[in-house]
Image (cartoon, rainbow, N blue to C red):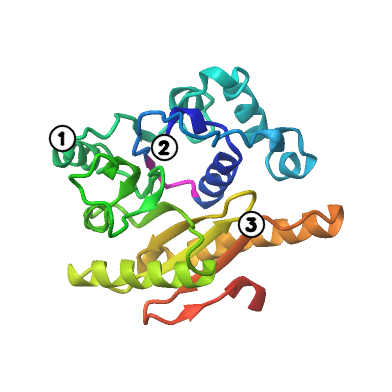
Amino acid sequence: MQNRYAGDVGDFGKFYLLRTLLGEKDRLGVVWYAYPDESHNNDGLHVGYLCNDGYQKLDEYLIKGLRAATEDLCERSIEKLEKQKLLPESTVYVSEVIPKKNREEWMDKALDKVSRCTLVFLDPDNGLEVKSISKNSSKSGKYVFYDEVVSFMESSSIEACIVYHHLGRNKSHKMQIQSRMKELKEKLEEKEITNLTIFAATFKPFSPRSFFIISTEKKSQIIEDKLKTVFEEERRLHNETKQKTKWDFDKMDSKGNFHIDFLNQT
């Protein structure tokens, strides 16, 4: 996550999903995977949604907060997002920039900070690791590595881990999602973390990104029900406004079976 992206349309999807998934007894940990701002492109300028009634009808409080955080487009920041209190007071934030050296030390501190959370959200700039970038690369801070996801899921308190991932253009989105789900499942099972359901909530506006939700058996039905509320609200608004739907939902069950657009079948 870079400061210059704060309040972009992707943040609406991010906060809307987190606000929906949280239950009364949950405590959320947000690990920003903060990365220094870059200036080689104009990414992060998709803020026109803030004036779109379709978004406001989904979550008026969230839109007001995101408007406040983007009031000065030249001074956007993760800190401003946190100050809007878009998430519960009990939320724990890990906001330190990932260092180019001693990443393991940063990781240990992050794990300690969220150790009492039931849900944890990992928000890397690009998403899950790629083969061309190692942990020693200058660009490694833009990714979350599979062993880090495993470390969060090894925590006794964490019942679900949500991972941001930007979809690429090399394959179809469904193929990418299925491949990543399979890899996540394999890496977790290598450490004997089993009986997991992995959901993919894909937020489609402008540049699609998926939120992989890795859930324990205890939490999976609760999460599925929460995603169903997003789906049903989307369908209601589509019928009312005729705007395009913003979300797709896929699932890999605990046996490794892939269910495409599974909520359309319920």
Judged from this view, the residue extending furthest toward the front is: 40
* Nearest to viewer (mark 3 / mark 1): 1
Q: CA distance from mark 3 to mark 2?
A: 24 Å
How far, Cα to Cα, is label 3 from label 1?
Answer: 40 Å
State the image quarter where residue 220 is shown: bottom left
In primary-sequence order, the first of circles 3 and 2 is 2
Depicted 167 relative to depicted 45: above or below: below
Q: What residue is disc 1 on? A: 101
Label number found at residue 230: 3
Amino acid at circle 1: Lys
Task: Please provide the residue range marked out in magenta.
Answer: 22-30
Amino acid of disc 2 = Met
Magenta span contains residue 203: no
**Residue under label 2:** 1
Front residue of 181 and 65 = 181
Percent position of residue 260, x then y: 55, 76
Inspect this view and state whether residue 266 appears: no
Q: Is residue 62 left or right of residue 191?
A: right
- Mark 2, residues whose alpha carbon is within 10 Å: few (<14), some, or many (≥20)? many
